[in-house]
Amino acid sequence: MDIEIKKLSPELLDDYLHFFDTIPHFTNKEEDRCYCVCWCNVAYEGQDFSTADKRRNIAITYVNENNIQGYLAYYNNKVVGWCNANTKADCLECQCGKMYMSTANKKESSPDIKVKAVFCLAIAPEMRRNGIAKLLLKSVCDDAVQEGFDFVEAYPNREFINTEYDYMGPAKVYEKLGFSAYYEIGPKLVMRKKLK
């Protein structure tokens, strides 16, 4: 299967929006479409994410301003996967950062440690189990090395429930790429891969 991975940029905005417009992610309900705006490098205070239309419009701004970062997977020129990956330290004040990361270690043992965080891993239902998640994560890790990061970190559930609620993917996907459990936060694992 010929999968192409591209780093999200404003030029790929239409592809990004089309993926969230058409691919079931959290549920099949249109009003639940997330556009991944809750994981970004913008503080949550003052943001209105109450409807899919509002989230879509915010996504347009965020992608154009490089506030949402990540990778798109293409098959036959169509987006079939998405991985949200951003600098961990930049995303602690976003909506999901405040909700889910409040108990995570926010400070590293040294201020010089740079961590790239994987916040979401979404694959089109008909394309799952084709290695797309691994290709997306490999791109995150490869670029993180080039960008001077020390670790890539992810937050999957300890026990995989289903793709609707485990939007970070199963822990096994990360283990296959050299991630290991760093510590636990309630039902979630903090998994890390050392890059240097």
Image (tube, rainbow, N blue to C red):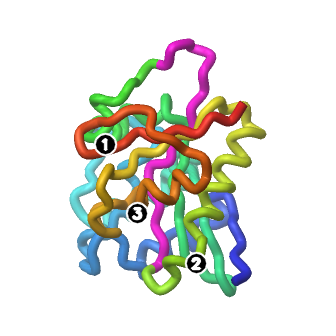
Specify whether residue 117 is painted magenta.
yes
Neighbours of disc 3 within 10 Å: few (<14), some (14-19), many (20+):
many
Residue 125 position in % (x across, y down):
43, 81
Rendered location of residue 62, percent (x, y)? 49, 51
* Mark 1 or 2, closer to the camera: 2
Label 3 to label 2: alpha-carbon separation: 23 Å
Using the image as rendered, state which of residue 184 and residue 82 is in the foreground. 184
Q: Are marks 1 and 2 in contact (CB under 8 Å)?
A: no
Q: Which residues are drawn in magenta?
A: 108-124
Name the residue type under label 2. Asn
Which amino acid, mark 3? Tyr
**90 shown above or below 100:** above
| Position in image of residue 184 (x %, y %) | 33, 36
The relative height of residue 180 versus residue 59 in the rendered view (above or below) is above
What residue is disc 1 on? 95
Whole-number angstrom distance, CA of label 1 to CA of label 2: 31 Å
Q: Residue furthest top?
A: 110
Q: Judging from the image, what secondary structure is the residue with disc 1 in?
A: helix
- The residue lying furthest to the right in this view is 146
Mark seen at residue 130: 2
| Image vertical order of residue 97 relative to residue 32, above or below | above
Q: Secondary structure at mark 3?
A: loop
Lower sequence index among marks 1 and 3: 3
Whether residue 32 is situated above or below residue 76 in the rendered picture: above
Q: Nearer the viewer, mark 3 or mark 2?
A: 2
The label on residue 108 is none
Q: Which residue is mark 3?
A: 35
Q: Where residue 73 sits: x, y (%)?
A: 62, 70
